[in-house]
């Protein structure tokens, strides 16, 4: 069964990232433990294949920090088989607001779509058309495989507040599928955690105060960008 498998077709929210070492991560959890609870899918392994143009135009554009950017990826929770459900996603960011639209398909259906142009059945037609338009517009090809582990929390009083911690981040630029996690390389050191605060509104005061006490400040971080810099942009 897929962790995080409840299908969410569309959402819009504000996201802020932070880079923590293990010690700071543990101290922060102690600071905020009375205000958070474990999410329904507390622990998950996330695998993604990122798509870009042949010349990496999407990530190059994103590195210039435009007011609008988008990315396309295929995501599974854990290693997938051809019959497992996966998520085909388009993620957009305009200024500080992020929106994500995705369809749930089997990995086999995605391969039939990508290689044969056969649109998957029983998915949201509007979202699939939007994703298909992007694939055709940019002539998208698989560029990177990235996998990592994640702990997920939500606010006790505000379930729209989510706090995630990603760690053990790895990547590869060959064998770009979701069928295995073999032959990957570390993206960052193992004791690095990427925290992301996701909310429909503003960050609550109790969390702002905890971040301030521990001197934790926002820092932009993109796994795709980091991997691109390591192996493509030299």
Image (cartoon, rainbow, N blue to C red):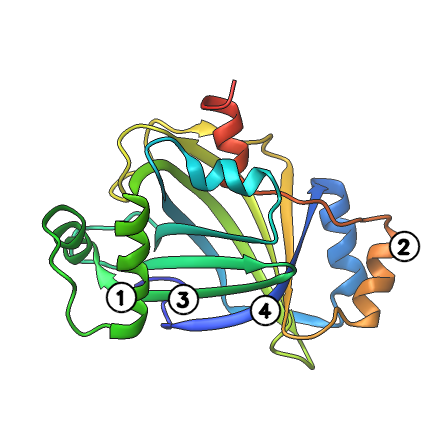
| Tags 4 and 1 touching, CB below 8 Å | no
Residue at the disc numbered 2: 213
Residue sitting farthest toward the top: 234
Residue at the disc numbered 1: 129
Residue at the disc numbered 4: 13
The image position of residue 24, as x and y in percent, is 77, 45
Of tags 2 and 3, which is closer to the observer? Answer: 3
Work out whether mark 2 precedes mark 4 in sequence or the reverse, and give the earlier one: 4
Q: Quadrant of residue 144?
A: top left
The image position of residue 94, as x and y in percent, is 58, 60
Of tags 4 and 1, which is closer to the observer? Answer: 1
Does residue 119 appear in the picture of this structure? yes
Give the secondary structure at mark 2. Answer: helix
| Foreground pick, 222 / 177 | 222
- Around disc 2, counting alpha carbons within 10 Å, would you say few (fewer than 14), some (14 to 19), or many (20 or more)? few
x 37%, y 58%: residue: 89
Work out whether mark 4 precedes mark 1 in sequence or the reverse, and give the earlier one: 4
Work out whether mark 4 precedes mark 3 in sequence or the reverse, and give the earlier one: 4
Give me the C-alpha separation between circle 2 and circle 3: 36 Å
Of tags 2 and 4, which is closer to the observer? Answer: 4
């Amino acid at each position: 069964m897929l962790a995080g498998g409840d299908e969410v077709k569309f959402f819009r929210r504000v996201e802020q990232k932070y880079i923590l070492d293990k010690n700071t991560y543990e101290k922060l959890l102690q600071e905020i433990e009375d205000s958070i609870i474990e999410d329904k899918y507390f622990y998950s392994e996330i695998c993604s294949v990122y798509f870009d143009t042949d010349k990496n135009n999407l990530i190059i554009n994103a590195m210039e920090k435009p007011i609008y950017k988008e990315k396309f990826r295929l995501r599974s929770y854990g290693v997938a088989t051809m019959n497992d459900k996966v998520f085909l996603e388009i993620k957009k960011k305009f200024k500080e607001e992020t929106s994500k639209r995705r369809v749930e398909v089997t990995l086999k259906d995605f391969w039939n779509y990508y290689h044969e142009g056969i649109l998957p059945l029983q998915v949201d037609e509007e979202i699939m058309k939007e994703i298909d338009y992007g694939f055709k517009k940019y002539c998208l090809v698989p560029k990177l495989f990235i996998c990592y582990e994640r702990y997920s929390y939500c606010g006790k009083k505000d379930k729209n507040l989510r706090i995630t911690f990603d760690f053990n981040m790895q990547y590869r630029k060959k064998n770009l599928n979701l069928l295995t996690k073999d032959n990957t390389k570390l993206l960052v050191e193992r004791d690095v955690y990427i925290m992301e605060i996701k909310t429909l509104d503003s960050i609550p005061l109790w969390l702002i105060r905890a971040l301030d006490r521990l001197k934790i400040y926002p820092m932009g971080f993109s796994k795709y960008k980091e991997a691109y810099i390591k192996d493509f942009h030299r």
